[in-house]
Amino acid sequence: SGRGLFAAGFRRGDIVLNTFSYHLTPGGFILDSGARAIGCVVIPAGPGNTEQQLEVIEHLRPTAYAGTPDFLKILLDAAEQKGRNAGSIRKAVVSGAAFPPSLQAEIKRRGVDAYQIYATADLGCIAYESPAREGLIVNEDVLLEIVRPGTGEPVPDGEVGEIVVTSFDHDHPWIRLALGDLSAIMPGTSPCGRTNVRIRGWLGRADQTTKVKGMFVRPEQLAEIGKRHPEVGRLRLVVTREGEADAMALLAECAQPSDALAQRLAESLRAVTKLGGRVELVAPSSLPNDGKVIEDRRALT
Amino acid sequence: SGRGLFAAGFRRGDIVLNTFSYHLTPGGFILDSGARAIGCVVIPAGPGNTEQQLEVIEHLRPTAYAGTPDFLKILLDAAEQKGRNAGSIRKAVVSGAAFPPSLQAEIKRRGVDAYQIYATADLGCIAYESPAREGLIVNEDVLLEIVRPGTGEPVPDGEVGEIVVTSFDHDHPWIRLALGDLSAIMPGTSPCGRTNVRIRGWLGRADQTTKVKGMFVRPEQLAEIGKRHPEVGRLRLVVTREGEADAMALLAECAQPSDALAQRLAESLRAVTKLGGRVELVAPSSLPNDGKVIEDRRALT
């Protein structure tokens, strides 16, 4: 994760308060080794123990923070409330949770320049923000693809899909590991000068498996239907409640709609899912670009 | 700490559940690096999260445990109560808390062969048990002395005193670091074949500073009195309550008692502590061998 930390302004001599856990998760170690690789000193702090962390911050005066955005806010709030000095922390790398613009603004107002990194337990840092703050730049160590959920097929650039990564680490290679997270490739390159592919931030979870009338319906099943009908484009299964029962509608993009095609799709839907449903043929590119192949519109409460 | 782990039966290929914390303390890292140095695989588990630890134990089947003796008992108890299998753990290194014979017997009964190591945050492993189970063998990396508390003066072998260690680590040397713990050198060498000096286990804390009539009285002050009177041997200040007031008695070992000597000692006692007290001259070697120079007999409740 050294490259991501460097992009966030971490430099040799920085003292990093690493609040990612070292216990039963690689999170702490990923940031620890990355920070030390670029010459930082690391305080292995782990999460929690706010009081003790404030002691450590005052005594060791870390210049940088690594951890969740939420815990950074907890620390800064606690310091403010208790009149403790946490002002040594001026930069941060945050990960592991949403970092909405409202929280970004608040952290910024407290004098901390925080950047997101997107990392996973298996591969470490996948992508990272740079001062350009335009999307996340993919790390040089990984090949990243965006695929249609439930398949291994890459979507066109810009379309939302599931993140799939490949790493040629000799000790621990990963070939096309699907991460279950949604994102999309951004066009062009970053104004900061880094040239690698960029992705939008985290756009939700890819796993859209749901239950309809007590039966599992999976993205893989939609992919199977698509394979049987090469004349249709993207598919989207919309699940609703009608009266007091579950109902499904299969929306299919196609250039030349016909009743016969709709009929064949309905048959495939039943064959693959063991469930009946309506079929609607829609114009190409008319379905929303949100990575969803199953949209569950049922109110859960 | 690799040598101590090896003495406890840890070997290449062992999977070690390391429940010492990695957060804001070097404990976890000391055991982690030691275990990896001798070829073990380490699960950085940290303390707590008993439920999750039982999951990890069943899935990864660690063969060895490192942590406090108390947490080992908590894990084994929880496994028994919940019908979980923790039987893969057959050896253990315990530290950081008392390991009384009753707990040793119980851990043994559960099929775990547990050995103590004596380690500190600053120096790592100082001494360790071996299968001989006769005291703790001093680690080869450190010079260990037992000194009279409040002084830097070594006591004769066998006498209880404060542990002082010296390490010639080039990156982080420690010269005569007083650890605040009491122990004593054991005579002879271990039947296990290791030849280094042995110490008895932990015999309490060396810091005996107390308050008498609202004034601090410190072991260093007793050492100062001893220095002024080379004709006396060991000193022991006994603090009691008489009526409703604090009282002190200075017990001094000497071969040739005299009223004049007692008088001079009483004057030194007042000069050094700003407090008056009785003086009793006692026979050489008649004071208890417990490392105490200040004995506080006041009931604290």
Image (cartoon, coloured by chain):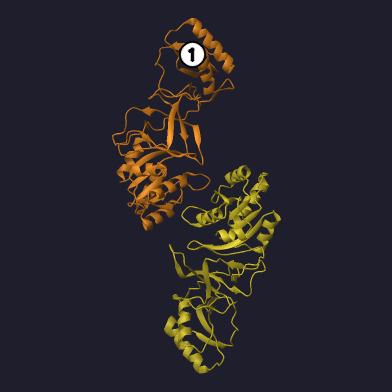
Chain colours: A orange, B yellow
- Image point 45% across, 79% down: which residue? B221
Residue A202 left/right relative to A211: left
Give coordinates of residue B250: x percent, y percent: 52, 83
Nearer to us in this view, B228 or A268: A268
Chain containing the residue with disc 1: A
Residue where numbered disc 1 is placed = A230
Q: Secondary structure at mark 1?
A: loop
Residue type at mark 1: give it.
Pro
Placement of the N terminus of chain B among the 4 image quadrants: bottom right
Give coordinates of residue B24: x percent, y percent: 46, 55
Nearer to us in this view, A241 or B164: B164
Residue A137 left/right relative to A258: left
Q: Residue furthest right?
A: B109
- Image point 34% across, 35% down: which residue? A101
- Image point 46% across, 64% down: which residue? B169
Residue B126 position (above or below residue A204): below
Q: How many marks?
A: 1
Give coordinates of residue A17: x percent, y percent: 40, 50
Based on the displayed image, in which of its 4 quarters is residue A104 positioned? top left
